[in-house]
Amino acid sequence: MKTVQSIRAQIEKLQAEEQEFIERERGGVIQRCLDAIMTYRIAPEELFDSEGQARIQAQTPIKKARPKVSGYKFGATYSDGVNTWVGRGPIPGWLKAHGEDIDKFITNARFAEHSARPGRKVS
């Protein structure tokens, strides 16, 4: 069984390995950057402002995570108090067990009068 001390020792060992790796790779990274600067004749002021902060932002924008699917966006949300179905995919067994009258399980007011999937047969 692992102890906190053994885990901390592993962390310290991995951090030391990380530092060694960075030091080994750093020279090559710097050389590749210098080669690109010389090839494309990039001036320091194109890269850094007067305080030495980088001017260039990442070229590929960071994509925001898609919001989680909600029943309100896609249609009615059905619930019997224990189970919930957002109206996507096959109708679950707990809802099929109630036969054709599943609209009484709609929980969001926006769809209370209309089924999320009109004409869909419950079988």
Image: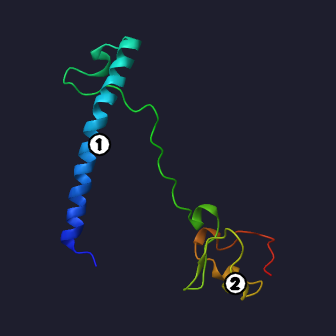
**Residue 121 or residue 59, whichever sits in front:** 59
Q: Amino acid at mark 2?
A: Gly
**Residue displayed at 40% across by 33% down:** 58
Q: How many marks?
A: 2
Image position of 56 with respect to 42: above or below: below
Residue corresponding to mark 2: 93
Categorize mark 1 by other alpha carbons within 10 Å: few (<14), some (14-19), many (20+). Answer: few
**Residue displayed at 59% across by 61% down:** 73
- Image spot of residue 10 (x, y percent): 25, 62
**Residue displayed at 18% across by 70% down:** 5
Q: Tell me the quarter of the picture where residue 4 sits.
A: bottom left
Q: Quadrant of the C terminus?
A: bottom right
Image position of 52 with respect to 113: above or below: above
Q: Nearer the viewer, mark 2 or mark 1?
A: 1
Image position of 74 with respect to 64: above or below: below
Q: Quadrant of the N terminus?
A: bottom left
Residue corresponding to mark 1: 21
- Image spot of residue 75 (x, y percent): 65, 66
Q: Marks 2 and 1: CB-CB under 8 Å?
A: no
